[in-house]
Image (cartoon, helix red, strand yellow):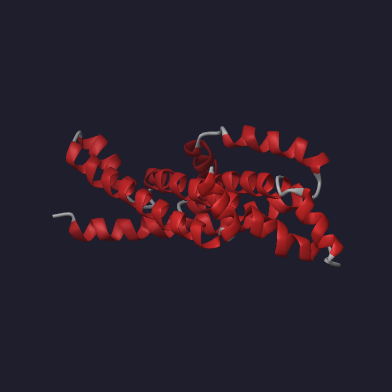
Amino acid sequence: MYGGELIRNIGIHLMYVFASVFFGFILGMTLGILLSRAPKYSKIVLPILSVFNTIPGIVFIGILFLYLGMVPMTVIIALSIYAMFPILKNTYVGITNVEQQYVEAARGCGMNRRQILFKVELPLSMPTIIGGLRMATIYTVSWTVLAAMIGLGGLGEFIYQGINLNQNALILLGAIPAAILAIVLGFLIDVLQRKVTPRGIQKEVRAK
């Protein structure tokens, strides 16, 4: 009965998730790298961002809706910002936790700061960064349900219809596919994390 509508809403849901995580990843990594280079400012910026992260998504989407209206960009901007937080934090932590002996060895080989970042620090911190990407993706799958509140579709449409009509079947029709999407995407990112983790680090993790 709802087959066609279910497929359409899954497609919309995934579009919001992929777009938001993509922009959140770029923004989070960029800010994380910049803050790792400015520890004085990171002590101010990171706590402020942590407070901002506590604002409920429904509030932020509602505010953007007042200014942008009922357009997909309203949802994408809001979700991109929320997806940015775990990626930013993990990027910052990953880079700042790289052991200085590797950085000093790279300097000794004649690398400049940019080369050290891209050839040493980012590769070594990539498992932590991908961990942030995993968190951001799973969270975004659930946050995207809020898109239905302003009439922009997604699996949340079934959930809110089910709540309004007091029909548990409709609620499950939205909730179960969303949960499956979160599990599948989380698994795929776990595979990616293993692929980008240097072999030496993989051996250390297994040893622990």
**Residue 76, percent across and down?**
50, 54
**Residue 32, percent across and down?**
69, 50
Q: Does residue 24 appear in the picture of this structure?
A: no
Camera-side residue: 116 or 163?
116
Camera-side residue: 70 or 13?
13
Q: Is residue 7 left or right of residue 139?
A: left
**Residue 160, percent across and down?**
30, 40
Q: Is residue 163 left or right of residue 131?
A: left
* Residue positioned 76% across, 41% down in the render: 42
- If the image is split into quadrants, where does the C terminus sit? top right
Q: Does residue 205 appear in the picture of this structure?
A: yes
Q: Is residue 61 left or right of residue 2?
A: right
Question: How many numbered marks have been drawn onto this rendered protein structure?
Answer: 0
* Residue positioned 42% across, 60% down in the render: 15
**Location of residue 5 by image quarter:** bottom left
**Residue 128, percent across and down?**
59, 49
- Image vertical order of residue 113 relative to residue 173, above or below: below
* Residue positioned 70% across, 38% down in the render: 46
